[in-house]
Image: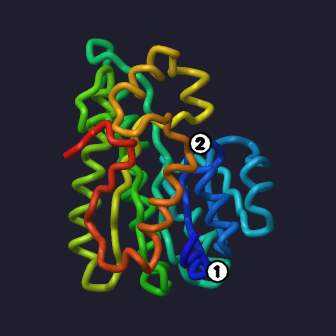
Amino acid sequence: MNGASEFQGKVAVLTGGSSGIGQTLAIHLAQAGCEVFFCGRRPTADETLSGCGERGHYFRCDITEDGAAEALIAEAMTCNGTIDYVINGVATDNRVPFENATPELFDQFVATDLKTAFRVCHAALDGLRAGKGRAILNFGTTNWMLGLAPFTLYSAAKSGLLGFTRALARELGPEGIRVNMLSPGWVMTQKQLDLYVSEQDKKDLLRDQALPFLLQAEDIVGPAMFLLSHAARAITGQNLVVDAGKLMQ
């Protein structure tokens, strides 16, 4: 990847990372020379750590809990006292028909898909100011843009993340800190394949997308690293859709 050397010696904080898109991104960042501090609730994250090598650092926690974001950031700051990149990738996309929704379930979606971004960005602010990368990347989704069911709670939280992204980009821009959002289409991660994707879903995607292939986690990594990189130094407050051309705005 052009410009990959710029990640050498940088520090990235990634929520999620033990599986799926987050895992693939963590490995690519580490292979590009970045020290990657990622979190999750699983007891171990051996597959990610194996791919990252000595540059991978797993912090086990529930990032939605009080104090977890601050503890993760404090751990990352022990590397060299700075943070270059913050990637908010943790999410829950459980299918909840609206008639079955409760205020408690709504709060869970907001706590995971929106509030964690606030917690981590707020905790990391001093580290970002001291770093050189100065980039925040929030992971969204095309679900709410397509108005898909049964994703009302998920869509409410993720669409709120776009407002957070744009307002924070305006607020932190004068300090040279960029804030962007990346919204993937339906990516064929192992979780999605195991729990949700049917053969008919695959046929429908290939019919509806402009590009006739099923999205893989690797397809998201290049755009993500671009938005983190100096090549995107003039890009902030934007939402980059990576969905093989299913949604065209």
Looking at the picture, does residue 177 appear above or below residue 119? below
**Residue 18, x across and y down, in percent:** 65, 46
Instruction: Mark 1 and mark 2 in contact? Answer it, CB < 8 Å.
Output: no
Marks 1 and 2 sit apart, C-alpha to C-alpha, by 24 Å
- Picture quadrant of residue 110: top left
**Residue 3, x across and y down, in percent:** 54, 78
- Picture quadrant of residue 175: bottom left
Residue sitting at 40 percent across and 22 percent down? 95
**Residue 217, x across and y down, in percent:** 56, 45
Q: Amino acid at mark 1?
A: Gln
Quadrant placement of the N terminus: bottom right
Q: Amino acid at mark 2?
A: Gly
Residue sitting at 38 percent across and 42 percent down? 243
Mark 1 = which residue?
A: 8
Q: Give left or right: position of 85 versus 175.
A: right
Mark 2, other Cα within 10 Å: few <14 / some 14–19 / many ≥20: some
Q: Secondary structure at mark 2?
A: helix
Label ID, residue 20: 2
Residue sitting at 46 percent across and 56 percent down? 88
In depth, the one of 173 and 65 nearer the eye is 173
Which sits earlier in the primary sequence, circle 1 or circle 2? 1
In depth, the one of 158 and 184 nearer the eye is 184
- Figure label count: 2
Looking at the picture, does residue 11 appear above or below residue 57? below
